[in-house]
Amino acid sequence: MHPFTSFIVAVFLLLLIGLLCLTTRRNMIRLLIGVEILFNAANLNFIALSIQRAGFIDPLGQMIVLMAIVLDGCVVAVGLVMTLNAYRHYGTLDVRKLRRLRW
C-alpha cells in the first residue's frame, strides 16, 4: 500500500472515532477527547497532503499544522476550564443534565 494511502486511511479512522465519540458520549471530558481526536485527524490530513508530491515536502502544510496545534491547546484549555466550572457549580458533567439548566 502506498504511504499516502495509509495516511488517508488513518485520517479516516481518526475522523470516525472522533465523530463516534462526539455523538455517543454524554460526559464533557469525553466530548473534549472526541474534539481532540478530530483536530488530530485534521492535522494528520494536512501533513499527508503536504507530502503528497514525490521528493517535495511543502512547508506550508507543516506551518499550518504547527499553528493548529497551538490553537488546539488553547481550545482544550478553555474547554477544561468550562468543564471544571460546570462541575463546581452544578455537580455533574452529564451534558443532558446541563442542557436542562437553560433559562
Image: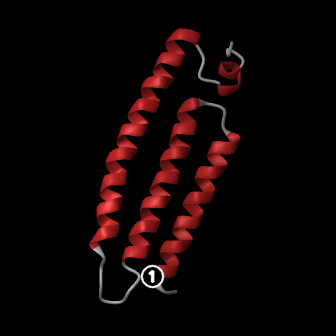
The C terminus - image quarter? top right
Mark 1: amino acid: Pro
Query: Is residue 92 or residue 85 the one in the foreground?
Result: 85
Left or right side of 5 for 67: left
What coloring was used for the rendering? secondary structure
Vertical position of residue 14 compared to residue 86: above or below: below
Q: Relative to residue 74, is residue 90 depicted above or below?
A: above
Of 59 and 9, nearer the camera is 59
Residue occupying image coordinates x 63% and y 43% = 22
Dot 1: element: helix
Q: Is residue 99 left or right of residue 5?
A: right
Residue at coordinates 47% horizontally, 52% vertically from top-left?
Answer: 39
Extreme bottom residue here?
Answer: 54
> Quick one: label 1, few (<14), some, or many (20+) residues within 10 Å?
few
Residue corresponding to mark 1:
3
Q: Position of residue 62 (x, y in %)?
A: 31, 66
Residue drawn at the location 42% of the way across and 38% of the way down: 75
Q: Position of residue 8 (x, y in %)?
A: 53, 73
Farthest front residue in view: 103
Residue sitting at the far top: 89
Residue 55: image quadrant is: bottom left
The image shows residue 28, relative to residue 68, as above or below, that is above
Q: Position of residue 14 (x, y in %)?
A: 55, 59
